[in-house]
Amino acid sequence: MKRLLPLILFLSACADRSQMPPEQLGAGTFASYQCKQCHRVGYEGGDAGPDLTFAGVRKSKEFMALWLKDPAAWQPNTMMPNFHLNDDARANLAAYMASLKGELYRKGEAPWDKVKGDPVARGKELFLRVGCVTCHGREGKGGYLNNNVKGSTVPSLFKVKEGFSKEELINKMKIGVRYPAKEDPQGPEPHLWMPAWGEVLRPDELADLADYLISLYPPELEGSDDDW
Ligand code: HEC
Ligand code: HEC
């Protein structure tokens, strides 16, 4: 019996694993591949890649699995390695990231709340931390690929001042655009859509984001920053 004990423990650990929900398995995979070296989740992690604390608000599980399969298919110059994951590992990781809806920043002081007295600077921090940057690009300069949309990319934002008042911008962010106009009406739905940020952000946060977007105009020709 004594000799069998390790085997019994091993087998029961396997049984437990198979009963774990995919997002929990994915959290383990995230740790074992050291994704945190480049990505923040809550108050931990690196900044060579985007903050994933709100990943599940902005990207679907399906898109995340596609991204993991081949990051360079969506961003040819990306630093993110292709991990050549098997289908199960990809599905579990995607489920884990889809479960991240920003709660971790609601437990204590959010990073942008450390920025006081400067709405544009606070808006910029929000733009990075909630991940507008992962679709609209740094300083809203655009460029991320989307499928079956006009121009093939998510729109840039640095010119919104020309077409929107502050109130209109806040309203646009609040409601989002669940179905961006398709390039080919018969083709598939675009994988990336504009989330309804009013579901997770407060009015003061939306207002500072609007101030930041308005401040992007006119765009700086040089010296684009490379913050995540
Ligand atoms: C060497 C740094 C690096 C590592 C390691 C890394 N990533 Fe990334 N990742 C990036 C960068 C940079 C981007 C942003 C895409 C771009 O513009 O290049 C990104 C983008 C992403 C995105 C999509 C963008 C978003 O936030 O909406 C997801 C999802 C993601 N990574 C998940 C992972 C997972 C899961 C792992 C571990 C298996 C991982 N990454 C490991 C650098 C990294
Ligand atoms: C998952 C990708 C994604 C993320 C993340 C995202 N957006 Fe968008 N956004 C879009 C898409 C796609 C559109 C275009 C919708 C359409 O076709 O009208 C858009 C449109 C917009 C527009 C309207 C632009 C125009 O000229 O009509 C604004 C303003 C905007 N986004 C702001 C933001 C802000 C601020 C954030 C972060 C809080 C954000 N977006 C995060 C995908 C995204």
Image (cartoon, rainbow, N blue to C red):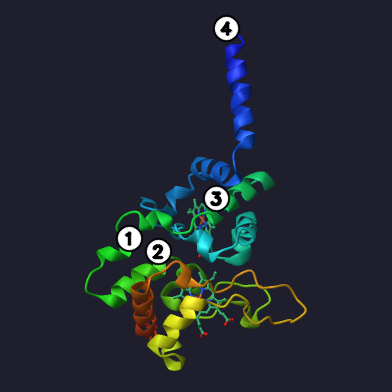
Determine whether label 1 and label 4 are within 8 Å by CB: no
Q: Quadrant of residue 39?
A: bottom left
Residue labelled with disc 1: 110
Quarter of the figure that contains the N terminus: top right
Mark 3 and ligand 1: say if the CB distance to the nearest ligand atom is below 8 Å. yes
Determine whether label 4 and label 3 are within 8 Å by CB: no
- Mark 4, other Cα within 10 Å: few <14 / some 14–19 / many ≥20: few
Q: Earlier in the sequence, mark 2 or mark 4?
A: 4
Instruction: Examine the rendering and report whether any part of residue 119 can be seen.
Output: yes
Residue labelled with disc 3: 96
Q: At label 3, which amino acid type do we have?
A: Tyr
Q: Earlier in the sequence, mark 1 or mark 3?
A: 3
Q: Which mark is residue 2?
A: 4
Query: Where in the figure is residue 141, as x and y percent of width and height?
Result: 46, 78
Q: At label 2, which amino acid type do we have?
A: Arg
Looking at the rendered image, the disc whose residue lies closer to the viewer, 3 or 2, is: 3
